Amino acid sequence: MAFKINFSHAGALALLVALAGAAHAVQVLPGGRTLAFALATGAVLGLVLQRSRFCFYCHARDWFEDGNPRGLLAIVLALAVGVVGYTVVLGSWLPVPQPGKLPPDMHIGPVSWVLVVAGLSFGAGMVVSGSCISAHWYRLAEGSAVSPFALIGSALGFILGFITWNPLYSLSVADAPVLWLPAHLGYGGALLVQLGGLALVVAWLWRGFAREAAAGSAKEGVPSLGAVLRSLWAGRWPYWVGGLAVGLIGAFAIVRMRPLGVTATLGSAARQWAQGQGWIPDRLEGLDGFAGCATAPQSTWFTPNALLLAGLVAGAFVAALASRQCVLRWPTWRDAARGLAGGVLLGWGAMTGLGCTIGTLLSGGMAGALSGWVFGAAVFGAVWAGLRLKRLWLAGR
């Protein structure tokens, strides 16, 4: 059973004004300008994600099941824009990249089979729960019946990840190489390799348009300006708009705060609670020495990542209200089970991989971290396999 919440645009505007007031209020706190910037950045990101339906799982599913390349091309565009932006910014911070000297706070992690398993787990969690963690955050604002359970499951998955971290660290992670491409190829070489790889992906995905043309379903025509303006709050934004905006936001964010990530606050809260219960070791070997979505317990909720998340959900809520896409539905047992099970896989993968599709793949890939590209390949490989298994299971019922 579902029902529409018919709030007017005035309600969305009121929430937007409240967001602006909150951004002004937090400036009196220590690091207030950074906190205000994080809140504003999160709000813009949430609005973009909701309006463009930017979802790693949905975009991958559209390609693997329907041959629609637009979503994955949007992800490629976001990565390409971010890679260029990060290269410019990091080149000014660290003019001469050298092996063993990493730019501070960038999501550059160790590369080993553990990272691959983490990516596979995260991808499987996307298939089971129907979204990645970032999409579950913005779908809270749309009234999703699955997302609350998926986020609870993700917290449980983080706890499970903390439990298994020390053995995995000793077995493989401790000796795994931390590879930053510019340190070995230079900024120009790393940029060329990464953009070249993305160009190959584009060439592979472009076949989808050839199929559409052969089937006579290719879209033609240029919309009028009025149609473009109306589309801001009706339907969805074009895929490329979401990809371009996400890439720009990711590149601009590092100028004032850490790279984008949507799991640090969730993981930190789960770690603090689980340590209080005595479920996980007080010492997690080497974990807090790695850059990425840090999960060290915080003494306050007023951190840049927490404000980013708050802004993301609020911005998505503004967009959902303005477009009248906020739909509440009472969850079923199936919703709860799917969300919790998928969330555990997402959380374990995000904790073990030191981030999710936003943190490890997007922010890591933009920074030139090999770990980001390896994690992304494992995630999309798991989505492809999971969708095939799901289709075979449904066919056999």
Image (cartoon, rainbow, N blue to C red):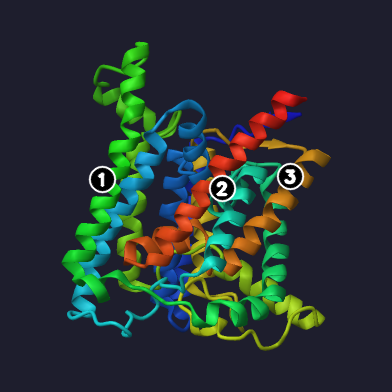
First along the sequence among labels 1 and 2? 1
Q: Amino acid at mark 3?
A: Arg
Q: Secondary structure at mark 1?
A: helix
Q: Secondary structure at mark 3?
A: helix
- Determine which residue is flagged by label 3: 338
The residue located at (33%, 37%) in the rendering is 204
First along the sequence among labels 3 and 2? 3
The residue located at (72%, 75%) in the rendering is 163
Which disc is residue 199 wearing?
1
**Residue 143 position within the rendered picture, expressed as x and y whole percent measured from the top left:** 65, 42
The residue located at (61%, 86%) in the rendering is 285
- Determine which residue is flagged by label 2: 382
> Quick one: label 1, few (<14), some, or many (20+) residues within 10 Å?
some
> Quick one: label 2, few (<14), some, or many (20+) residues within 10 Å?
many
Relative placement, left or right, of 224 versus 47 is: left
Q: Amino acid at mark 2?
A: Ala
Depicted 2 relative to depicted 137: above or below: above
Q: Quadrant for residue 349, please give it.
A: bottom right
Depicted 300 relative to depicted 132: above or below: below
**Residue 117 position within the rendered picture, expressed as x and y whole percent measured from the top left:** 58, 61
Q: Closest to the observer: 264 or 298?
A: 264
**Circles 1 and 2 in contact, beta carbons < 8 Å:** no
Relative placement, left or right, of 381 versus 76 is: right
Which disc is residue 343 wearing?
none
Task: Give how far apart the Cα atoms at labels 3 and 1 are.
Answer: 36 Å
Q: Residue furthest top?
A: 216
Q: Amino acid at mark 1?
A: Ala
